[in-house]
Image (spheres, rainbow, N blue to C red):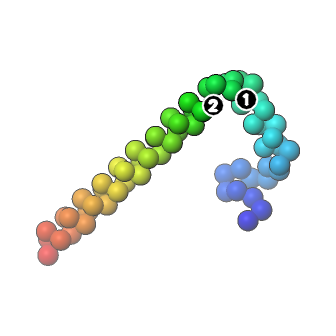
Amino acid sequence: MNELLFLGNLGTGEIVIIAIVVLLLFGGKKIPELMKGIGKGVKNFKDGVKGLEDDIKLDDTEKK
């Protein structure tokens, strides 16, 4: 898989430049906090999806 779906044709050089720009914009101390917030958001999203799947399965078993 040579290219990621949403990144198109970005190469290693472009990714390094983007990482440097992000580091300059947010600073070294803010990036871990930013990543922690993103991780919590993803975890909450997965928990919500799992809860919906459980509700759908429960509804299917009640209809039978």
Image disc number at residue 2? none
Residue found at x 35% / y 57%: 50
> For the N terminus, which image quadrant?
bottom right
Asked if residue 45 is positioned above or below residue 2 in the image, the reply reads above
> For the C terminus, which image quadrant?
bottom left
- Residue type at mark 2? Ile
Image disc number at residue 23? 1
- Residue type at mark 1? Leu
Q: Earlier in the sequence, mark 1 or mark 2?
A: 1
Residue 2, horizontal then vertical, whole percent: 77, 62
Q: Quadrant of residue 61?
A: bottom left
- Residue position marked by numbered label 2 in the rendering: 31
Left or right, residue 45 beside residue 4: left
Residue found at x 81% / y 41%: 16
Left or right, residue 7 beside residue 45: right
Residue found at x 25% / y 66%: 57
Residue found at x 75% / y 25%: 24
Compute the Cα span from label 1 to label 2: 7 Å
Asked if residue 31 is positioned above or below residue 2 in the image, the reply reads above
Residue 62, horizontal then vertical, whole percent: 13, 68
Asked if residue 38 is positioned above or below residue 64 in the image, the reply reads above
Residue most extreme to the right: 13
Left or right, residue 20 beside residue 42: right
Residue most extreme to the bottom: 64
Estimate how packed mark 2 is, as few (under 14), some (14 to 19) or many (20 or more) residues with alpha carbons within 10 Å: some
Q: 13 and 59: which one is in front?
A: 13
Label pair 1/2, CB-CB below 8 angstroms: yes
Residue 35, horizontal then vertical, whole percent: 57, 37
Q: Quadrant of residue 60?
A: bottom left
Q: Secondary structure at mark 2?
A: helix
Q: Secondary structure at mark 1?
A: helix
Q: 5 and 27: which one is in front?
A: 27
